[in-house]
Image (cartoon, rainbow, N blue to C red):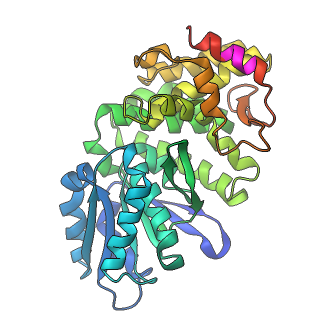
Amino acid sequence: MSETLVRVDLADRSYDIVIGGEVLSSIATRLSGIMKKGARRVFVLTDENVWDNHGDALKSHLATGGMEAIANILPAGEATKSFANLQSVLEWMISHEAERNDVLIAFGGGVIGDLAGLAAGLMKRGMPFVQVPTTLLSQVDSSVGGKTAINSSFGKNLIGLFNQPALVLADISLLKTLPPREWRAGYAEVIKYGLIDRPDFFEHLEIATPDILSGDVNALANAVKVSCESKADVVSADETERGRRALLNLGHTFGHAIEKARGFDGSVLHGEAVATGMCMAYRYSRELGICPGQDVVRAERLIETSGLAPTLSALNTGSFEAEELLEHMFQDKKVESGSLTLILAEGIGKSFVQKGAEIAPLRAFLEAETKL
């Protein structure tokens, strides 16, 4: 398949998202335009699963350009986004005498991308980094837009900064080794773009989902392309989430509360929590009388067809407490002056930002949701 370029337009910090079937093979050539002249070493942050599956390929492709990978291989999983690992990664680069003109490659999913981007932003006040996302979720969402973070004991992604990559290489072939569960979790973020503001894309997914989830390369590449275009448009207009970019958090306020309630223990993946959270956002919008019931049904149906859970009980991880979920929601980054911000919907593709959400109806809604 031919490669596709999606441009993230941010003036002098603009960059390309390169989407294709074998784009990793071109990494040495592409890095030569980012690295300082004569540089031969590349720092690589990755996890055990990705390195086992794709490490040899990356080293080989870098070697074609005379480059050597200096790799730091971390455990897989959300717990890796920690203070301890951030310190370890920074001191690893310092111990290798990393310079501001060196390049750090984030070779993995969203966890590795978030940690690497934050470390790159802090390293000697900033060094370039390149995203090579290896999961569907990271290819369509977390690798694009410059959000980087680690988790706190108080909640998810509370310590971070905006740091745009120099390049994103979304190689579709890397997704072949993903477990089915990771596929489904990533697909939640694809569905999100249709639910936010692309009703035509949502309608397309209602038809194309079986082909995409079966691994059809063309169907998958198109879904990644449209998702990246959608996110690039939003990021270019609102890089630091002062307005429209908050729409990209559809389902995330509920979803992050679900993850926190489970202690980020892996029993609920991020994409799984977001899928449930998006359905909750649509049901809450219906409860408020602003979203047609048939659109809620369509959202739930596509989530369920994709092998994801439309309700808390369908997650099959035990019961949830409404008050605990509400408490976690108030740790969300979008809380302003003690008031909660929610992303709600007036229908498919008609999401909006609701600031100062009323707590009483939300608490009653969560009570009902925990009993479904």
Q: Quadrant of the C terminus?
A: top right
User: Residue 78 at what x, y percent from top left?
Assistant: 40, 44
Magenta span has 170? no
**Frontmost residue, 198 versus 238:** 238
Quarter assignment of residue 101:
bottom left
Q: In this view, does 6 lie above or below 318?
A: below
Q: Which of these two is toward me, 82 or 31? A: 82
Q: How many marks?
A: 0
Residue that lies at the very extreme toward the bottom in this rendered image: 38
Q: Which of 76 and 247 is in front in this view?
A: 76
The residue lying at 24 percent from left, 70 percent from top is 61
Residue 341 vertical placement versus 25 (above, below): above
Quick check: 323 left or right of 72? right
Apparent side of residue 175 relative to residue 302 in the rendered image (left or right): left
Residue 321 position by quadrant: top right
**Magenta portion: prevailing SS class:** helix
Q: Who's the residue at 40% across and 27% down the image? A: 210
User: Residue 79 location in percent, x, y?
Assistant: 38, 45
Residue 240 in the image: x percent, y percent? 68, 58
Q: Is residue 166 visible?
A: no
Identify the residue at horizontal 63%, vertical 39% (top origin).
Answer: 331
- Residue 242 placement (x, y as % from top left): 75, 53
Residue 349 seen in render: yes
Give the residue at x 69% y 32%.
349
Q: Give the range drawn in magenta.
A: 361-365
Residue 64 as seen in the image, left or right of residue 94:
left
